[in-house]
Image: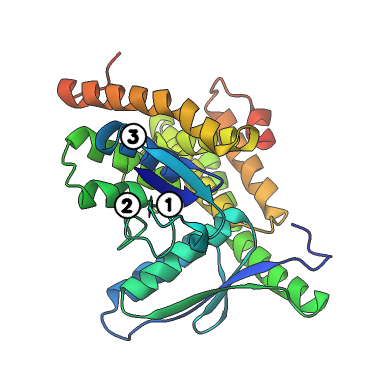
């Protein structure tokens, strides 16, 4: 399936792409557009104004995708807390990891194009998922 | 962002139903966190960059979700004087916030709090400094004063971070 989002990916779009590829559509192909009008007819838009899979009711797009596809994995919701604060910093959640992650993604997007940002952040989110999975199982930060 | 040459701005025009008040309050909080300047009732502005534009676009969608109307505009003040006045107003608002921080830091540095309590105060003030910096688009001199005051407070705790590292950030 094809998925479309705005060019110039930061935290929310990179995290959504990882989420889509790992949990919804392993064959996902991503298209980056400058304007919502450029979304191909066969692509599902995300993190774009007017799209269903975008910011609504104070949720960021990552949270929206979890709700829309009924992904109830508590680890993903724990990641959503971090992604939300890295993207919006509205202090809805306590996520001390968020400012660091935001800076890493911003810096990466300065030196790499969108396809490469997604390729490089894939393993980063895999690792974050594993870390938070162990933290939730242990009830404390894993060593 | 220079204050001399005219630059571009992103504007959000919006109208929300009077009731319920929750979305109005949520919007007001978010605009404050972004450091948006209220130009008129229902019209706010931020210097144009990708992040500011994106953040205002999300708020426009939230207004629509709450049953209101909103639009995003890219604009340029017609005169340099108009822009200077706006930037000066925004800088003055940030300056007041920094000043409060300076006073709190001085008070903590000269107070009789135990080191543990003082360390907690320092952590709280550092978080507050980050929040102010995030909404400060035209840094006034008070920003450096606030950084310096926190560095001095940190120095009274003999932490390993030297006073100058705070200032450099």
Q: Position of residue B150 (x, y in %)?
A: 58, 40
On the rendered structure, is A108 left or right of A18? right
On the rendered structure, is A91 left or right of B13? left
> Looking at the image, which residue is at 45% across and 77% down?
B70
Read off the chain for label 3. A
Name the mark nearer the viewer: 3 or 2.
Answer: 3
Q: Is residue B159 above or below residue A84?
A: above
Circle 2: element type: loop
Q: Residues within 10 Å of mark 2 (few under 14, many from 20)?
A: few
Q: How is the image coloured?
A: rainbow
Q: Position of residue A86 (x, y in %)?
A: 43, 43
* Mark 2, residue position: A92
Q: CA distance from mark 2 to mark 1?
A: 9 Å
Q: Position of residue A129 (x, y in %)?
A: 30, 27
| Screen quadrant of the C terminus of chain B | top right
Q: Earlier in the sequence, mark 1 or mark 3?
A: 3
Circle 3: element type: helix
Q: Residues within 10 Å of mark 3 (few under 14, many from 20)?
A: some
**Number of marks drawn:** 3
On the rendered structure, is A11 left or right of B100? left
* Mark 1, residue position: A88
| Screen quadrant of the N terminus of chain B | bottom right
> Looking at the image, which residue is at 41% across and 65% down?
B29
Question: CB of mark 2 within 8 Å of CB of mark 1?
Answer: yes
Q: Are marks 2 and 1 on the same chain?
A: yes
* Mark 3, residue position: A21
Residue B68's label in the rendered image is none
Read off the chain for label 1. A
Q: CA distance from mark 1 to mark 3?
A: 23 Å
Quadrant of residue A45 within the rendered picture: bottom left
In this view, the residue farthest toward the top is A143
In this view, the residue farthest toward the front is A42
């Amino acid at each position: 399936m094809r998925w479309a989002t705005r060019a110039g990916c930061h935290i929310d779009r990179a995290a959504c792409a990882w989420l889509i590829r790992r949990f919804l559509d392993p064959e996902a192909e991503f298209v980056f557009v400058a304007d919502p009008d450029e979304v191909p007819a066969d692509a599902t838009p995300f993190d774009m104004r007017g799209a269903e899979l975008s910011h609504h009711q104070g949720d960021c797009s990552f949270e929206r995708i979890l709700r829309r596809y009924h992904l109830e994995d508590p680890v993903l919701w724990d990641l959503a807390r971090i992604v939300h604060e890295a993207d919006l910093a509205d202090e809805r959640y306590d996520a001390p990891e968020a400012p660091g992650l935001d800076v890493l993604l911003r810096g990466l997007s300065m030196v790499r194009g969108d396809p490469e940002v997604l390729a490089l952040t894939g393993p980063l989110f895999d690792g974050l998922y594993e870390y938070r999975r162990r933290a939730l199982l242990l009830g404390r930060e894993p060593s | 962002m220079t204050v001399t040459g005219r630059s571009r701005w992103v504007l959000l025009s919006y109208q929300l139903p009077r009731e319920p008040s929750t979305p109005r309050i949520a919007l007001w909080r978010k605009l404050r966190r972004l450091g948006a300047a209220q130009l008129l009732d229902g019209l706010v502005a931020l210097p144009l960059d990708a992040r500011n534009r994106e953040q205002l676009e999300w708020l426009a969608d939230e207004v629509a979700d709450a049953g209101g109307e909103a639009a995003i505009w890219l604009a340029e003040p017609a005169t340099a004087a108009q822009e200077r006045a706006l930037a000066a107003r925004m800088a003055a608002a940030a300056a007041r916030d920094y000043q409060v921080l300076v006073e709190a830091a001085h008070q903590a540095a000269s107070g009789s709090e135990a080191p543990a309590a003082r360390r907690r105060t320092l952590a709280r003030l550092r978080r507050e400094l980050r929040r102010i910096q995030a909404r400060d688009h035209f840094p006034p001199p008070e920003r450096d004063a606030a950084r310096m005051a926190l560095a001095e407070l940190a120095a009274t705790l003999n932490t390993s971070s030297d006073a100058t590292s705070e200032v450099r950030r």
